[in-house]
Image: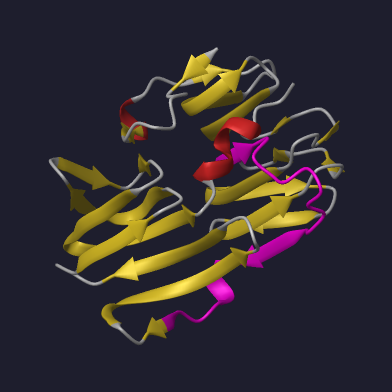
Amino acid sequence: MNINADFSKRVVVHSTELEWQSSPMAGVDRRMLDRIGDEVARATSIVRYAPGSHFSAHIHGGGEEFIVLDGVFQDEHGDYPAGSYIRNPPTSSHTPGSDGGCTIFVKLWQFDPDDRTQVKIDMNKMEALPIADRPDVTALPLFQDARETVRVETWERGAQVAMDLPDGGEFLVLDGGFIEGTDGLGAGSWLRLPVGSQLAAQAGSDGAKVWMKLRHLRHATADAPV
């Protein structure tokens, strides 16, 4: 299965407009944003757990990265409320589920195979940092290594945001919205810009809170599971 699998193209997906698709596990549905592969896939998705639903125990062959968008995600290692950012590296394992139901934004099989860095962050407990040369923007740094940068930025109402993306970028609107090109993106909208592009965005009347991953798309073709 290939969905938005050409990483040389700009892609905008308004996830709230997609139909939920059933996963192999009862009570767990998903909206697919990009995908290369079938059930074992390099994938970016919105995943919804119904109350009381659980996946079977599994090992992350290619790593798993996710944000809890609403509800409380759970596994044997802890409870993760909305606003949690988790990185489960290759070779890690867990039994995920949610007693009360939750929705997550998740990326699979997109890690460096040698990455063993576990990350568990509750963004609700972080203080946003000002950016010296961008007065209308604050940031929550989440992860950075030689391969990628992950953070959440908050853009004030009407902020003009320009960003060179020599290695591509990916953006998920968590709250508010922005305009990029001819597209208006609101909560749940996802934008992927290819290597060598530029983000030219304007925050909307309510500002915007945006999760972003930068510098990673140059590695995209090597990330599909085999």
Q: Quadrant of the N terminus?
A: top right
Identity of the residue drawn at 67% across and 55% down: 86
Q: Is residue 107 magenta?
A: yes
Q: Which residues are magenta?
A: 101-129
Could one spot residue 43 in this view of the protein?
yes
**Residue 94, position as x, y percentages in the image:** 83, 41
Q: Is residue 5 above or below residue 119?
A: above
In this rendering, position of residue 123 left or right of residue 4: right
Could one spot residue 104 in this view of the protein?
no
Identity of the residue drawn at 43% across and 73% down: 139
Identity of the residue drawn at 41% across and 44% down: 195
Color theme of the render: secondary structure
Residues 44 and 226: in front is 226
**Residue 21, position as x, y percentages in the image:** 50, 17
Q: Is residue 191 above or below residue 30?
A: below
Q: Is residue 178 magenta?
A: no
Residues 64 and 57: in front is 64
Q: Quadrant of the C terminus?
A: top right
**Residue 131, position as x, y percentages in the image:** 37, 82
Q: Quadrant of residue 4?
A: top left
Q: Quadrant of residue 50?
A: top right
In this rendering, position of residue 15 left or right of residue 121: left
Residues 130 and 166: in front is 166
| Number of marks in picture | 0
**Residue 49, position as x, y percentages in the image:** 60, 33
In this rendering, position of residue 4 left or right of residue 65: left
Residues 170 and 87: in front is 170
Q: Is residue 151 above or below residue 187?
A: below
